[in-house]
Amino acid sequence: MNQPLSVLCLASYEKGQRFMQQTKALGCRVYLLTSLSLKDNADFPRDVLDDIFYMPDQDNEWNLQDLIHAVSHLCRTIRFDRLIPLDDFDLEKAALLREHLRIPGLGESATRFFRDKLAMRMLASEHQIPVPEFTATIHYADIAHFLENVPPPWVLKPRLLAGAIGIKKYQHAQEVWDRIHSLGDEQSYFVLERFVPGDIFHVDSIWFGGRMIYAVASAYGTPPLEVTHAGGIFTTRLLEWDSDYARGLRWLNEKVLSAFHLQNGVSHTEFIRAHEGGRIYFLETSARVGGANIADLIEAATGINMWAEWANVEVAAALGRSYELPQPRNDYAGLLVSLARQEWPDTSWFQEPELVWRLHKRHHVGFIVKSPDYSRITELLDLYAKRVQSEYHASAPPRDKVRE
């Protein structure tokens, strides 16, 4: 009799509930390793977990040597078949453990291409995928050459943080040098690149056997960097399915992730279309479900839950079975999220029939609207943005770290 698969999920933050539920529904044993600081304030699906373990943490950071010892100790009695990182910041942890315990999946070198912004740009360039001009902040002569030959503005980005966290924009070379010198021994953990004003897009996709099975292309409203630094309202919406932009972005996403050798899993990849000239550049990718409620957005429009399909893909690959995507819908949806002045905003007066989801989170307001009519989504996002700006919106200083 075959033993069920044993899957260990790593979650230094609260997320991935649907992944764990679907993995259990597929007959697996599901274990969770999470931060001790989340023990009493995270809503993990304990009813589907065979066990839950806690790592001591400081601001959700784990000691990696202790992590190896802890999971190796668990392996004395549990044979883990797969290790799944549920958050972007858990990818390196999972890769470290896979290498040490010889468990299948992305190893440390392969994981670099889905976490390290410098590694991403170098590999993309090798495959003739357009990226903004960049340089590592390692060798001073390279930095000087870049600043002399690439026109400002420039952005200095942490190589291993997610989204817009820690990104700063500069107009003058001396500002860049001052920032680099202020980083001391940490300066090699950054990448410097040309700032390209433009429209930001994301493609969320499912991969199996090294092939792109499904992909959804969407457009942010205000670029996430501007939302973070100027305190705007975050919006995103699916592109028209048969538009040239949607087809082109799906094709480019396939080219990127084929070059990055993604085999089985899901990805959230971002591109920018320059205002000047309209060229599309690759910005960054990942080997996980998109954050900021993007999975809820995609499910509202298509019926496809990226977390559940990730579980289906991982289990099928582990068992040597085929994977079949459920039949998707081709509706449209839009997402809006904002900080709110009120601790628990009352949004009950939003009653449009297309409204299918509300965010319930302290000092936040958020909505998803769904319709078969693309223009109606654009109309509703514009309307909701005006309402939220007037009645709820608040802003906070940009973060330099994951938790401050």
Image (spheres, rainbow, N blue to C red):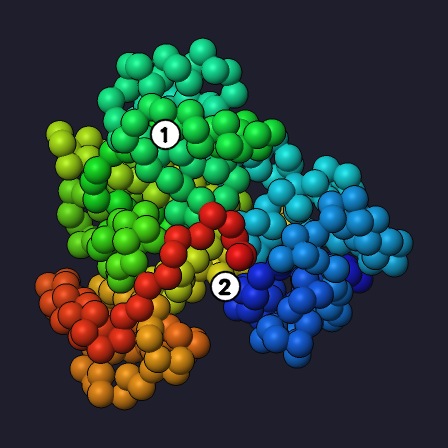
Which residue type does callout 1 highlight? Answer: Glu
Q: Indicate whether 210 appears above or below 222.
A: above
The answer to whether residue 170 is left or right of residue 185 is left
- Three-letter code, disc 2: Ala
Place of residue 22 in the rendered image (x, y in percent of width and height, measured from the top left): 56, 67
Q: Quadrant of the N terminus?
A: bottom right
How many residues crowd mark 1 within 10 Å: few (<14), some (14–19), many (20+)? few
Can you see residue 347? yes
| Nearer to me, 19 or 96 | 96
Q: How many marks?
A: 2
Considering the numbered disc 1 on the image, is that residue within a helix, a strand or a loop? helix
* Labelled disc at residue 175: 1
How far across and how far down the image is residue 29, in percent? 71, 65
Question: Residue 158 location, x and y as percent?
Answer: 48, 38
Residue 87 in the image: above or below residue 47: above
Q: Is residue 262 left or right of residue 384?
A: right
1 or 2: tag closer to the N-terminus: 1
- Identify which residue is drawn at 26% across, 45% down: 200
Q: Nearer the viewer, residue 361 or 244?
A: 361
- Which residue appears at 49% of the width and 36% of the height? 159
Q: CA distance from mark 1 to mark 2?
A: 46 Å
What element does badge 2 sit on?
helix
Across and down, in percent, residue 166 comes to 44, 44
Label 2 packing within 10 angstroms: few (<14), some (14-19), many (20+): some
Q: What residue is at 32 percent from the left and 47 percent from the top?
A: 225
Q: Which is nearer the eye, 1 or 351?
A: 351
Q: Which residue is mark 2?
A: 308
